Amino acid sequence: MYKQNVQLKEYNSFRTEAYAKLFCEPENIAELKQCIADYPTEKKLIIGGGCNLFFTHDFDGLIIKPKLTGITEVSDEENEDEDIFIEVMASEDWDNFVNYCVEKGFSGLENLSLIPGTVGASPVQNIGAYGAEVKDCIKEVIALDINTHEVLSFSNSECEFAYRDSIFKRTNKYIIISVVFQLKRTYSYKPKYFDLNKELENIAFPTIKDVREAVIRIRERKLPDHKKLPNCGSFFKNPYISKEKSEELIKIHFDLPVYPQHDGKIKTSAAFLIDKAGFKGKQIGNIGTYKNQALIIVNYGASDGREIVKFAQTIQDTVKDKFGIELEPEVRIF
Ligand code: EPU
């Protein structure tokens, strides 16, 4: 089951090179338990599609890439008419699953169409797009505790979801086995996100399928396909700033996007700040930002992940100097 000295280039969508000391692809829960039992003291990293992480050096430990597949519609006596519960194994492809739901008329995930990666990775960073976050459709997450080898169930609140964050991202203690989604059998479009509303403006009552197709069109226009141009999606999180800070910035940049939050803070746009700092479409050596979306860092051919980190640091320093705002990476760097 174990391979040694495995090149990780094909396992991260930035395509950086690094070797893993040990690598395995367990195909069921028993094998998964076996591999954590076989190497109790080795450092471990669990990867899905590798679409939100990259390597800057060799990994001195065990990389586990689970191969757990299956989609099961589980009924729930109490709620059967309105909602549908679906348990999806961690290694299912995210967008295939979204397409499955859209084809069957189950609503909730259509705004999250075309996000690369696996179902198991979706709760880790609480994927989000076009006004939706996956946390709003998750009933529970089933995960293996790496230390105790127990299979645990996390209710939605126990997952401690936040913007691009969860207990799974913060602790690195759990391997996600499956996710139970709670979706609706009915649908009516609720305008939430400017770009998507605009794309749908000629349709009076958009169906789930219309929404999926609109999201796909927007994403294909704005975001590069990592299979053609290696990238990990948004490189930084959108930053939170104080109300005072936003007012100060708006005096100079009247078009600064501001999204007021429940706690009084203001979420603003990292893409806007990077763009205004002169980085949109800019390339230094092998690394650049995408021409249509300044928040996406793209790799034109670097094999050393440190080149990406260096470029990202240049962006962070410039944005800090120009706006006094610290950008925090959203992508995981190993
Ligand atoms: N903008 C610019 N320059 C640009 C791009 C955008 O100034 O080059 C400004 C515009 O004002 C625009 C605003 O930034 O209205 C927001 O841009 P966009 O709608 O593209 O969204 P985003 O905030 O940059 C977030 C997510 C994306 C998600 C989109 C769509 C984060 C870190 N990123 O990006 O998620 O697809 O919204 O909902 O929250 C990802 O996480 O990998 C990802 C791609």
Image (spheres, helix red, strand yellow):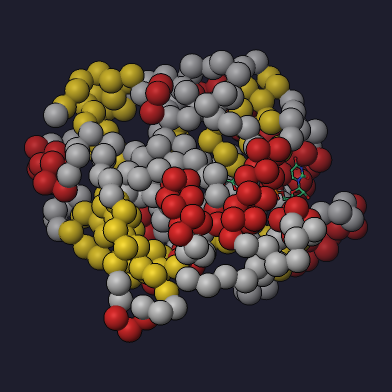
Quadrant in which the C terminus is drawn: top left
Relative image position of residue 250 (x, y in whole percent): 86, 58
Query: Residue at 74% across / 30% down in the picture?
Result: 291
> What is the residue that sits farthest to the bottom in this orientation?
78
Q: How many marks?
A: 0
Relative image position of residue 308 (x, y in whole percent): 56, 26
Q: Is residue 48 visible?
A: yes
Quadrant in which the N terminus is drawn: top left
Query: Residue at 28% across / 45% down in the picture?
Result: 69
Relative image position of residue 20 (x, y in whole percent): 29, 24
Residue 64 lies left or right of residue 163; in this view the side is left
Looking at the rendering, which quadrant does residue 211 occupy? Answer: bottom right
Residue 195 lies left or right of residue 226; in this view the side is right
Of residues 313 and 198, the one nearer the viewer is 198
Query: Residue at 41% across / 21% down in the picture?
Result: 9
Q: Is residue 295 visible?
A: no
Query: Residue at 39% across / 70% down in the picture?
Result: 84
Of residues 164 and 218, the one nearer the viewer is 218
The answer to whether residue 333 is above or below residue 123 is: above
Relative image position of residue 56 (x, y in whole percent): 44, 26
The answer to whether residue 36 is above or below residue 182 is: above
